[in-house]
Image (cartoon, rainbow, N blue to C red):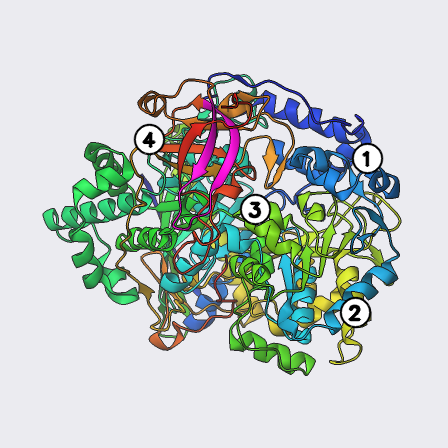
Amino acid sequence: MKKAPGDEPDEDLTVTPPKKWAAGVPAVVHAMEYSLEETSARRTGTTLLTMNQVDGIDCPGCAWADPAPGHRHRNEYCENGAKHINDEATTRRIGADFFREHSVSDLAGRSDAWLNQQGRLTEPMVKRPGSDHYEPISWNDAVGLMAEELTSLDTPDEAVFYTSGRASNEAAFVLQLFARALGTNNLPDCSNLCHESSGYALHETLGTGKGTVSLHDLHHADLIFLVGQNPGSNHPRQLSALEQAKRNGARIIAVNPLPEAGLLRFKNPQKPRGVIGSGTQIADRFLRIRNGGDLALFQALNRLLLEAEDARPGEVLDHGFIDADTTGFEEFARHVRGVEWDGVLAATGLTREEIEQVRDEVLRSERVVVCWAMGLTQHKHAVPTIREIVNFLLLRGNVGRAGTGACPVRGHSNVQGDRTMGIWEQMPDSFLDALKEEFGFDPPRAHGYDSVNAIRAMREGKVRFFLGLAGNFVRATPDSTVTEEAVRRCRLTAHISTKLNRSHTVCGDTALILPALGRTEKDVQATGEQFVTVENSMSEVHTSRGRLRPASSLLLSDIAILCRLARRTLGDKPDIAWERFEADYGVIRDHIARIVPGFEDYNRRVARPGGIQLMNPVNEGVYSTGTGRALFTRNSAEAPRVPEGHLLLQTLRSHDQWNTVPYTSNDRYRGIHGSRRVVLVNPDDVRALGLSDGERVDLVSVWTDDVERRAEDFRVVPYPTARGCAAAYYPETNLLVPLDSVADHSNQPTFKSIVVRLEPARVGAPQA
Amino acid sequence: MHSIEQTIQIAVPVRTAYNQWTQFQHFPRFMTTVREVDQIKPSLTSWTLAAGPLHGTFQAEIVEQEPDSHLVWRSLDERPGHRGRVSFTPTPDGGTALTVRMELGLNGPAGLVPGVSQAAGRVVAAELRHFKEYIEGLGQESGAWRGTIRGGRLRRAEAERNVSGVPCWPHG
């Protein structure tokens, strides 16, 4: 184990050619190196060998599904999961001494990586009004401060409760219950920032907000689309499923502005052929699409399929399915036949021939799956784009059958489960009625704030209390300057956290750090050792049981913190057994079983190996769309106007990063080493804009308001991204994303679609 | 492609025989070659076999299923591919004639082994006898799934198409 860094690392940028394959031996080496820097060999062994095993620790890294019990590898994790779990299992600790040494302003000047590397939080801390230091506080007093603030609010809607995907089903359920018993639906979550557009579009068209595929469907698809996602860095275990699909004869088409290593080739470190062989080619075709061109691509494909049907009537479309199970086909067909090629080619940056080749692949394939991630969801027209993908799937009956379906790939381990548990500001009356029936209080019906609206409300002074259940709110959200100013207007901010992050440095008048048990740690309560449950991206609900001794004796579980807060704030009105919840998480699951459809007999069923496979209605022939049928939609969107001399920027994460937490300044698959302040630009654009390789520039975003949003001092790196596009890392570039630049319908920030210009860097430039 | 066809007379009504057949997870209780069956979703099952030409794990798609009538499946794995149909026909004495017809795509080394399809036929015949003994012995089915599958997709009556036993709010 290495000591935490005292100073920020001083490194120089070096750039090497992007890698053409992912994983292999280097992935194992990097995972082990990082793990052993953070913790001991023994703890590394414990975490890794129990990770994603039946009865083990669910990796908090991503929401990818595990193979069935009995079919898992001894090492069922990826490089990023190993880094992430040992980042939590670190033996570094920070307590009162650390906060005496470092003021809040000092910490606010530190990088995200530095803050993370200091180690695990060990005791509750408070920053009092007027002070620039955190100081220790007892749990009783910390909970008391929050309860006092909550009970003094003019209305419960002055409180906001944010949930991140680390939270278990039980913690999420308790949080939403507490918020609603208090009287508010202000329950923003990280889904608002990642797959809200997917949920909206799928719910509207298929009647379910969740993906419809299982691992088996991927294994047996004839054709798989990977659209706007980077599995090599963000869901590496997906590569194993793709490898198996390839071995079963699947073809894969990757659609992305950047030719990511994991889209091209995978060397599976679990197999001899991945260690010494050349690995498996992943994408048979790679379409280097412009940022946000996916709607136009799928519209063009749909038009081509309709034309293929015209040429060979009855052979291309699944008329039996369309007639029996869908509505809206005629209107959709009329609309999509009018899509013009000029617009498609401009929006996609592809050639007509490339798109026609994709059509031919589709026509040869009986079973098609489309996978996607943030590359689709974070645009103004994200919802229409995903609806158009549903149109594409419906045309040839590629839903509800084996080897087919829609696969939104979620990035945080329980982001799907938290929503299932009622973390949503707009829960339907059926759920609220069930809460009323079960707990005897009338939950508020008015919709609450999502993440963007919560920031707007804070900015307007309408929020006085903010509690974050895990996560790093100010770094995960857009318009960093605006967001931080908004958060600072709160009277009390509190974060349930395992490690330090920037959100702890952006304080309300009073700020609390509430240190919690991590997934890796044993959770012992009054009735004995507890486990929690989570739901993965493929709707499997299973247990997660920590194995390590907690980082400090003063840590409480998320559930314990929330139950104590609820009890202190609400007393016995309504009469909810918060104490019993804390003592025995099975009691919480018994309530969930009576409230959330599909969770009947929860405690017994989730204890089985592999847990519960929640039914997906689409696979059961059920379309809860109101009409009982899947819905074809007519979609249109205006491409973002990118003025001359500007680029369309997407924010993305590096390979050595997990959500808002960069581990190092390296991104080895993309060949970036030693610095995160880089902007990746197509070499032709570099020339056309009169820039040079390595030039220092500021990124300035263009928006309809008069605010200048400037990310300073980035180095230009020529990179094979699509023409007219650029890419740079978040959270450093989140400040460029205007708060009001959101997806239609889903209100999700447009992190992948920001118009920017590159100006010579002001920092370090000679003064005039 | 090697074909196998076996018929067996079972002394229970068609409904009982059919219902029992839909309980795939019970197959290992009476079939000696079937070690484990996992129903992934209504039209997709995963089978682990312990012996015979279909040794190993494979996934099978149920392409057609009509209660008290028939069920058509196909394996989804490349090798060895197979497809089959099981039909349930009432007999005059109130029993069931159960017919299994299978086509084995033994295009790998297994296809070169002399008599392989005869061997597979004997395995199927033996397993049908086991099924007969099981359901006749029990006298009533251990469960039932009465759904209809067409084209690999579960069909619902209009009235059931909007009803779902799962959370149907949008998931971000």
Q: Could you say which is closer to the camera, residue A196 or residue A580?
A: A196
Q: Secondary structure at mark 2?
A: helix
Sequence-wise, the earlier of marks 2 and 3 is 2
Q: Tell me which residue sits at (81%, 46%) in the image.
A: A133
Residue under pointer 1: A91
- The image quarter containing residue A245 is top left
Q: Amino acid at mark 2?
A: Glu
Task: Provide residue A481's location: percent of width, then percent of height.
Answer: 57, 46
CA separation in Å, label 2 and label 1: 35 Å
Q: Residues in magenta?
A: A696-716
Q: Amino acid at mark 1?
A: Thr
Nearer mark to the viewer, of 1 and 3 = 3
Q: Could you say which is closer to the camera, residue A19 or residue A691?
A: A691
Say which mark, if any, is on residue A481. Answer: 3
* A41 over A622 or under it: above or below: above
Q: Amino acid at mark 3?
A: Thr
Tell me if label 1 and label 3 are in contact, CB under 8 Å.
no
Sequence-wise, the earlier of marks 1 and 3 is 1
Q: Secondary structure at mark 4?
A: strand
